[in-house]
Amino acid sequence: MAERYNIKETEKKWRDIWTAQKTFEVTEVTSKPKSYVLAMLPYPSGRIHVGHVRNYTLSDVVARYKKAKGFNVLNPMGWDALGLPAENAAMERGVHPQDWTYSNIDQMKKQLLSMGLAIDWSREVATCAPEYYKHEQSMFISFYKAGLAYRRESMVNWDPIENTVLANEQVVDGKGWRSGAPVERRKLNQWFFRITKYADELLEGLKTLDRWPEKVRIMQENWIGKSQGLQFTFDIVGRDEKLDVFTTRPDTLYGSSFAAIAPDHPLSKTLGADKPGYADFIKQCQAGGTSEAAIEQAEKIGFDTGAKVQHPFDPSIQLPIYIANFILMDYGTGGIFGCPGHDQRDHDFATKYKLPIYQVVAPENGEKVDIQKEPYVGPGKMVNSREFDGMEIEAAKSAAIAKMENLGRGKGVTQYRLRDWGVSRQRYWGCPVPMIHCEVCGIVPVPEKDLPVKLPYDINYDAPGNPLDRHPTWKHTTCPQCGKAATRETDTCDTFFESSWYFLRYLDPKNTERGFSDAKSKYWMAVDQYIGGVEHAVLHLLYSRFFMRALRDCGYAVPDEPFAGLFTQGMVTHATYKDKDGKWVFPAEVTVTPDGKATLTSDGSPITIGRIEKMSKSKKNVIDPEDILETYGADAARLFILSDSPPERDLEWTEGGIEGAWRFINKLDRMLQDDKGNLNNAAKPGSFSDAASDLRRKSHSTIAGVAKDIDNFAMNKAVAKIRELSNAIDGFNPKDDADKWALNEAWSMLLAAANPMIPHLTEELWEQIGNKTLLANTAWPKVEEALLASDTATIAVQVNGKLRATITLPKGADQKTAEEAAMAEEGVKRAITGLSVKKVIVVPDRIVNIVAAA
RNA sequence: GCCCCAGUGGUGGAAUGGUAGACGCGCCUGACUCAAAAUCAGGUGCCGCAAGGCGUGGGGGUUCAAGUCCCUCCUGGGGCACCA
């Protein structure tokens, strides 16, 4: 009996060898094609979770496979180390954010190392290091000089729990994305990045990203939110002021019955301030949007200013101007014209304030619509619209825009939903904005030679708000221009800043002069395969795309699109458990019997099994990867994660699944110990037995199939093919030297194909079958195409589309042969008894379908 | 409300319009064992003793042939949402 495979020792042995030999360290090699494989960098929370394991296993499979395929593969890792959790830990536990972060990095790195990842650790980056953020401060200044970073007073989303500003993207359903607290609106001076300058470029660029998931492209497209329409000017009756409005439905202009402006529109005060009830109304609008209930009810309210505008096409028509809470100041012009007949919101509003509702579009099929009851928003032709009558909607839009342009009152314009990216955070643990406020000179960038502006270490959290702002000395400095006393900007940057360019820093991590050299960027960029969670579909991925364009315009050599290929993995889920008191319980504390009953392991009390959900700390349905790696080893963990679900779908973590993977690891080792004496790696024999030929066909088709599956991210299918080959090897009994040669070939190919998934075991067995060089450095096996084609084909025989028999014929047998063989089958004869054959369809080597009827 | 995506055995999931259920989990039978675990051999979509019939969320359609294409409905998941 062979000694059982020692997972722990063997896995460590190979990791040490890879490290010692610097197997995965790379430099720019022009003789090979490059491949940049990148997993989204983790936040150093201190412990890896199963989602990380899935992410890095996927990127590792791709990296190892690409390396075998002859690519010069860069697969780096780093830490997204700035951010709020470190400060929360500081406040809760009195540790310093920096110390907390670095100790977390140490712990997490140990865990990652135990996964056996093919990472070039010499390029490791932590974004909280001044050596890192120095370069983004330099970029910030470049952006400022290029007009891409600017400061303005603006309404911000204020998170009252975290005491900080949130980006629009960080507000989910009116609540802070982390705290869950209802967001308030406050006015503050804030730094912004002018992402809107690239709105159209970012939209157009999506079309070139053919290796991105369709879903992510659609989400970004919606986020950018391009709409074409007409902007025009209303004259206000009896006043000099004008009202600009934007509409995507200029065709419905003759159906308008009111105009409306946002509560914070400049005209709001001008027209309304002296009217009774105005102040109350404005107060009511501001309340709306802060409280959760108000957001959900979202009732439309309006205030009649008493002022009127003239219809641009017919000054005799006068429309009342309302102030309405559903108009947004920061979209379009902050003003609209209302056409209640063909817009739901306008209809709601008109109904409430008893404004007239006119029909100007009629369905073409003559269907009657009751426009007073509900608006009609479908296709049709114009009615009650004078010169536009009879036109299709699209034609009427063009005609209305043309007419307005001729009148000199407006023009066709494009609007975007995308807003500039607010990057200011009133927080300590972030990259300091490298700016100085001087009473004389205004805002002055910190000179390049004074970078980085480092965070001070001696801070305290005794009071709420920003520790930088109340630090006794840090913010006091002198103006670089006039030399007078001045103060530093105390805002730090949104942490999405760091992750917008980290993949460039990996290319040149030791460069002290610039963030990265142009030459290295030209060699490695773009990232060939980026892998991470779909939760970053808009935020991180859009910011990174913006960053490339901004850097490009500041003279850096970067491609417009940072990520040529993107793969978004599914979540890892697990059943949830509650004890008899209704409290959540960790899976590790629960024993589940085969009949599906669960008890608390410690005292045998009953446990209720709940829904299968995304792993989350709050529901305790989490598995600690460290336990798994310790118990089953890295190979088993990796194999299980890859084998069950397609990577883009959710993966349910099950005890049975990980055990199955672990059994397979041990089985492979046992099989090899049995086969060891039966391998022949001498010269290739001239002929093979039928059984050996079958095995060889399986070996070669596995190599071809696994390659295709990995290329398509169908890792579960690749694993299935590897198991099939191992089953074929298991069932093969070599009888002569040629058989032994075929068996040796099968083992070599099995190990090569499985190496990206289970690198430790395959490396070990590779050595045991007599190889002197690392499998990690071995080229992907060459497929003998001739072997893939079998010389016979199994053909299905159907009668009226139902399977009645299968026949085996030589490949390429002609239609007549196939038809005759099919007709000779008992099952076929029986099925056509009493019927006459009308037609026979023969698809060579595939199917014969006999169409028969009475 | 709008926009995506997905519904296949007990279960995770396979299937260029051409033999539905590969591969795994679970389960059943057997071998080994005093016994159990591990391992090994075999079986396992449903109904039926069998012959056979029925089967990819429901209904309709295209086709010699539909899990796959088209229409429609249902269910689940995700994204966006006073965006004029």
Image (cartoon, coloured by chain):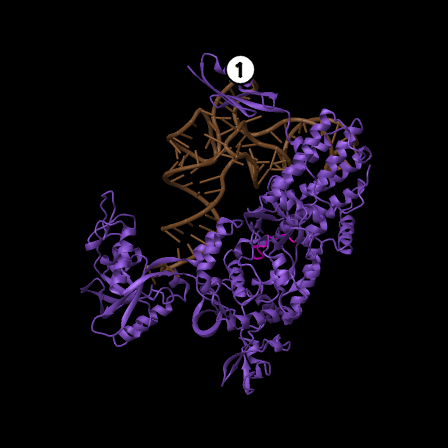
Secondary structure mostly seen in the magenta stretch: loop
Q: Viewer-proximal residue, A98 or A395?
A: A395
Subunit under mark 1: A
Q: Position of residue A497 (x, y in %)?
A: 55, 66
Secondary structure of residue under mark 1:
helix
Instruction: Indicate the colour of chain B.
Output: brown
As shown in the figure, which amino acid type bears the numbered disc 1? Answer: Met
Residue A839 seen from this side: yes
A769 inside magenta stretch: no
* Chain letter for the purple colouring in the rendering: A
Q: Residue at x 59, y 45 (%)?
A: A713
Q: Viewer-proximal residue, A280 or A185?
A: A185
Quadrant containing the C terminus of chain A is top left
In the rendered image, the residue lying farthest to the bottom is: A484
Q: Which residues are magenta?
A: A616-624
Q: Position of residue A424 (x, y in %)?
A: 51, 71
Q: Residue at x 62, y 74 (%)?
A: A452
Residue A131 shown left or right of residue A234 in the figure:
right
Residue A41 seen from this side: no
According to the image, label 1 marks what residue?
A823
Q: Position of residue A835 (x, y in %)?
A: 45, 13
In the rendered image, the residue lying farthest to the front is: A31
Q: Position of residue A621 (x, y in %)?
A: 59, 52
Residue A114 shown left or right of residue A368 in the figure:
right
Query: Looking at the image, is A16 positioned above or below residue A754?
Result: below
